[in-house]
Image (cartoon, rainbow, N blue to C red):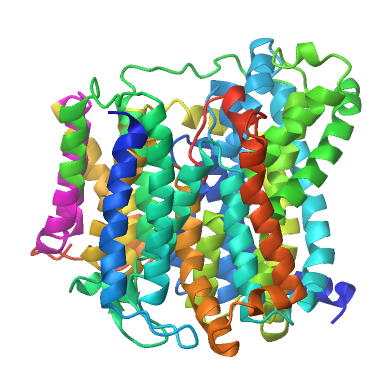
């Protein structure tokens, strides 16, 4: 099936009324989650995963994907109007977006982020459409050694982009790998680290762990901030459409942001947050008036907002072509595909073309829906932001409890979530990030299997990892990434840009 | 004691437990790695990273700022979450959810009337949303909901 055929076939799938409905529900919930600070897309996707069990696989993934890229749109609204990021990837948008709102230009700021997001989101789906089938053909020849090397590189990349210390990020990745071994060993059937607890026999559930680390712990941290009140921008928002001058200034930032975002989105761990920061830094560098950044220049809104949306599209590449998730949300989507009996990876395009093309084309439609949802409905989202946290947080906790319980109708999963809620809180207090742990937890079992199979293949010789060119290349890149920070100790790493530029939030 | 020192010691302790478990699970041979192979090497990596962290921590000084936190409230919320899970299958979704919301609203200083009405309404809407509309299976209590 070639590109055109595939896209047309995908449109046929995505335009079915039921799939349109799921797509709409997904992007609507996504926008809601993006607008509300303290509930990220990872927790939301995890929460809604059980409710998609009865749907068809296509519908389920279309909806869950919609939540993800929908959240990227919603996050900017909160950044601009309240000066707190509704979603972690919208942190930079606060800088110039809120400054614009203070100058009475909230309308164009919201408008350019919605339109820029739409353009970037669409461009990134176009690139996804072209790249994914091609890459799937390349990765088809990958054996266990290639997979092991690629996953090693992925985890290393993730820790390289870590905002705090790389050692701590590596530590979290290792803990995640070890947590991934909990449960029954797939090869020998031996129970490992279960300590006689029935809930652990199937391994640690991804949904309860994510709900704990990203949902519960976030609420606990927010509860500590006593009496911190954020003023919602009160003035009525007028004139959402950016004028000709705005467009002239924004078009190049949107284009650059789309490209940057898409390619950074492919890399595991880099994702939407880093993409938005890199885009902001780039725009500031190429600008003729860098000193005005932060005082409300539209380029500082258009670039990063385009970048984080494009990154959401790029993140689908490793999932659809390799079966390796690039972030926590993709990890849940991977889980969702497997629950529906599909094996994500290079074979997906052959085995389930309806899913492969359906998801991709649904994103064109979803992006259009988001534009419609976001521009006229902004007053409604703004009103939602006035709901006090005292009313909001009990419900967020409740949703986490319901989500964790309903995956398997098991109280044990709820307790796992409870424990990881506390763990996540302590991790934040001790400056550890959750993202490497989650990703390692998901790919841990795959990595272990690939490693053991490789060793069986090579009869116990590690030369299998250096004699195959692709494997050796991936591993060499990983080693290089590990040594760069040691060699250039004094120079700031890309992750450190983010620490200087604004408040850090947990990667979702 | 600094953050890195405290957490480094913790991870070192964890790595020792993992290493012992890994050995107990049998490592197998290189050509046929056993169930303990991956945990063992993972544990070794963890120990190494914990030592690097500790090495850095000993050169710097720091303090943990866990004090000044609103402990009573935080502990109460954490306890309420656990209580919710422990009572869920005994009392049923609707009852436990109402009580849970009531407790948290009161904790935030909302008035009694407001809290009671909001928690009952909140529980009812969640029941409608998850049980009736999304068809999530939720445990029923002695009263059937």
User: Magenta stretch containing residue A46, yes or no?
Assistant: no
Residue under the point 51% across and 74% down = A446
Residue A37 lies, with reference to residue A466, above or below; the image says above
Left or right of A338 on screen, residue A223: left
Residue B41 lies, with reference to residue A24, above or below; the image says below
Residue A421 lies, with reference to residue A49, above or below; the image says above
Name the quarter where the N terminus of chain A is drawn.
bottom right
- Give residue A445's position: percent from left, percent from top: 46, 72
Front one among A440 and A468 = A468
Q: Locate residue A117: give its quadrant.
A: top right
Front one among B130 and B108 = B108
- Is residue A196 visible in the rendered image? The answer is yes
- Give residue B40's position: percent from left, percent from top: 37, 69
- Give residue B53's position: percent from left, percent from top: 41, 41
Residue under the point 51% across and 38% down = A165
Front one among B85 and B139 = B85
- Give residue A234's position: percent from left, percent from top: 54, 15
User: Magenta stretch containing residue B89, yes or no?
Assistant: yes
Left or right of A305 on screen, residue B14: left
Front one among A136 and A387 = A136
The main secondary structure of the magenta stretch is helix
Residue under the point 10% across and 62% down = B90
- Is residue A55 visible in the rendered image? The answer is no
Q: Locate residue A251: give its quadrant.
A: top right
Residue under the point 15% across and 64% down = B89
- Disc tally is 0
In magenta, the rendered stretch is B82-111
Q: Locate residue A21: give its quadrant.
A: bottom right
Left or right of B51 on screen, residue B82: left
């Amino acid at each position: 099936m070639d590109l055109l055929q595939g896209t047309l076939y995908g449109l046929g799938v995505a335009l079915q009324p039921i799939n349109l409905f799921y797509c709409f529900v997904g992007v609507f919930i996504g926008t809601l989650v993006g607008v509300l600070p303290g509930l990220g897309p990872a927790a939301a996707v995890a929460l809604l995963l059980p409710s998609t069990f009865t749907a068809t696989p296509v519908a389920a993934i279309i909806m869950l994907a919609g939540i993800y890229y929908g959240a990227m749109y919603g996050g900017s609204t909160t950044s601009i109007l309240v000066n707190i990021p509704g979603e972690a990837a919208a942190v930079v948008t606060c800088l110039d977006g809120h400054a614009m709102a203070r100058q009475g230009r909230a309308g164009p700021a919201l408008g350019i982020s919605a339109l820029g997001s739409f353009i970037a989101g669409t461009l990134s789906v176009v690139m996804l459409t072209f790249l994914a089938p091609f890459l799937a053909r390349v990765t088809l020849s990958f054996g266990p050694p290639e997979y092991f090397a690629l996953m090693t590189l992925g985890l290393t990349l993730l820790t390289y982009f870590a905002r705090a210390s790389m050692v701590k990020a590596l530590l979290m990745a290792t803990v995640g790998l070890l947590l991934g071994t909990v449960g029954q060993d797939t090869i020998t059937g031996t129970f490992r680290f279960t300590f006689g607890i029935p809930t652990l026999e199937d391994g640690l559930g991804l949904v309860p762990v994510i709900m704990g680390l990203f949902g519960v712990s976030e609420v606990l941290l927010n509860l500590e901030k006593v009496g911190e009140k954020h003023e919602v921008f009160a003035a009525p928002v007028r004139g959402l459409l950016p004028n000709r001058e705005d467009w002239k200034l924004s078009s190049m930032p949107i284009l650059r942001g789309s490209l940057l975002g898409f390619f950074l989105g492919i890399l595991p761990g880099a994702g939407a947050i880093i993409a938005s920061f890199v885009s902001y830094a780039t725009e500031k560098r190429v600008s003729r008036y860098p000193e005005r950044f932060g005082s409300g220049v539209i380029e500082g809104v258009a670039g990063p907002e385009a970048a984080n949306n494009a990154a959401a599209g790029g993140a689908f590449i490793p999932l659809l072509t390799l079966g390796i998730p690039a972030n926590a949300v993709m990890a849940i989507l991977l889980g969702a595909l497997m629950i529906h009996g599909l094996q994500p990876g290079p074979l997906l395009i052959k085995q389930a073309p309806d899913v492969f093309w359906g998801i991709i084309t649904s994103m064109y439609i979803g992006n259009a829906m988001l534009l419609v949802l976001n521009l006229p409905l902004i007053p409604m989202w703004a009103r939602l932001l006035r709901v006090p946290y005292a009313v909001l947080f009990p419900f967020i906790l409740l949703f986490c409890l319901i989500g964790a319980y309903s995956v398997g109708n098991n109280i044990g999963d709820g307790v796992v979530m409870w424990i990881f809620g506390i763990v996540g809180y302590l991790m934040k207090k001790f400056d550890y990030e959750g993202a490497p742990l989650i990703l390692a937890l998901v790919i841990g079992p795959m990595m272990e299997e690939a490693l053991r199979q490789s060793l069986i293949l090579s009869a116990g010789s590690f030369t299998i990892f250096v004699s195959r060119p692709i494997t050796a290349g991936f591993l060499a890149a990983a080693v290089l990434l590990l040594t760069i920070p040691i060699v250039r100790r004094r120079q700031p790493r890309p992750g450190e840009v983010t620490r200087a530029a604004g408040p850090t939030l947990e990667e979702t | 004691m600094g953050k890195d020192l405290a957490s480094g010691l913790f991870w070192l302790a964890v790595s020792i437990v993992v290493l012992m478990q890994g050995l107990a699970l049998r490592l197998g041979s290189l050509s046929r790695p056993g169930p303990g192979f991956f945990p063992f090497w993972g544990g070794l990596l963890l120990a190494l990273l914990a030592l690097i962290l500790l090495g850095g921590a000993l050169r710097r000084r720091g303090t943990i700022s866990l004090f000044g936190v609103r402990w009573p409230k935080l502990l109460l919320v954490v306890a309420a979450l656990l209580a919710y899970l422990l009572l869920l299958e005994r009392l049923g979704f609707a009852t436990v959810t109402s009580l849970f919301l009531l407790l948290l609203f009161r904790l935030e200083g909302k008035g009694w009337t407001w809290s009671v009405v909001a928690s009952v309404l909140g529980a009812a809407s969640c029941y409608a949303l998850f049980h009736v509309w999304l068809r999530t299976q939720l445990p029923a209590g002695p009263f059937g909901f």
